[in-house]
Image (tube, rainbow, N blue to C red):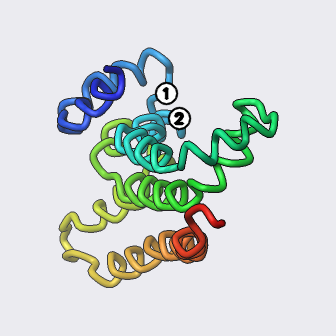
């Protein structure tokens, strides 16, 4: 029942959540802070769904064998389950980072000073036309620099995803 409730939140458009998020951020004093920018993207229903589905794919025989060997539930989770779900954690890490790095609407609303603006918000400010016109060279240069951290994160996690897919499963 709780899982279905969490999944049902995926049907709510982000635009409908902006006002409650802003009220919460204001109440916590998070407007124009890093916590205010981060908190909507810290935990998402998709992450719960992905990890639950991946965890349910771990064979029960493997977990039962660990219980027979005398492992406690936390040790089973840490030493058996977590190594099995590294590919899912890597994929979730990439998708969460990518979604939060490219977020535009929420950072525009929650930031007030130029020091706290994210790259997409800062790049959009250069798109406004003034007497000299749009500075396309600056926009393209900033966009190129904004892609570099995403490529680095992907290259770091890519090896773990491929390794996890090729080595997954129960041997024996």
On residue 155, which mark appears? none
In the visual, does 71 lie left or right of 31? right
Q: Residue furthest top?
A: 27
In the visual, does 63 lie left or right of 41? right
Give the residue displayed 70% in from the left and 43% down from the top: 65
Q: Are marks 1 and 2 in contact (CB under 8 Å)?
A: yes
Whether residue 112 is visible here, answered yes or no, is no
Whether residue 87 is visible here, answered yes or no, is yes
Q: What residue does disc 2 label?
A: 35
Q: Which image quadrant: the N terminus?
A: top left
* SS class, disc 1: loop
Residue sitting nearer the eye, 132 or 66 = 66
Percent position (x, y) of residue 2? Answer: 35, 21
Q: Which image quadrant: the C terminus?
A: bottom right
Q: Residue furthest right?
A: 70
**Mark pair 1, 2: CA separation:** 6 Å
Give the residue displayed 19% in from the left and 33% down from the top: 12
Give the residue displayed 74% in from the left and 47% down from the top: 79
Percent position (x, y) of residue 163? Answer: 59, 74
Percent position (x, y) of residue 3? Answer: 35, 28
Give the residue displayed 55% in from the left and 75% down from the top: 166
In the visual, does 122 lie left or right of 150? left
129 to 57, vertically: above or below = below
* SS class, disc 2: helix
In the visual, does 21 lie left or right of 162? left
56 to 12, vertically: above or below = below
Lower sequence index among marks 1 and 2: 1
Q: What residue does disc 1 label?
A: 30
Percent position (x, y) of residue 167? Answer: 60, 71
């Amino acid at each position: 029942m709780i899982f279905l409730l969490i999944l049902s939140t995926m049907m709510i458009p982000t635009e409908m959540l902006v006002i409650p998020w802003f009220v919460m951020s204001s109440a916590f004093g998070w407007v124009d802070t890093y916590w205010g920018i981060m908190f909507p993207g810290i935990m998402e229903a998709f992450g719960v769904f992905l990890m639950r589905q991946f965890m349910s794919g771990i064979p029960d025989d493997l977990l039962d064998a660990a219980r027979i060997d005398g492992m406690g539930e936390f040790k089973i989770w840490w030493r058996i389950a977590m190594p099995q779900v590294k590919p899912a954690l890597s994929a979730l890490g990439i998708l969460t980072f990518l979604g939060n790095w490219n977020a535009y609407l929420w950072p525009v609303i929650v930031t007030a000073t130029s020091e706290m603006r994210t790259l997409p918000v800062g790049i959009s400010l250069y798109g406004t036309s003034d007497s000299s016109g749009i500075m396309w060279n600056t926009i393209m240069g900033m966009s190129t620099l904004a892609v570099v951290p995403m490529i680095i994160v992907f290259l770091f996690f890519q090896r773990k995803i491929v390794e996890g897919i090729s080595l997954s499963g129960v041997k024996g």
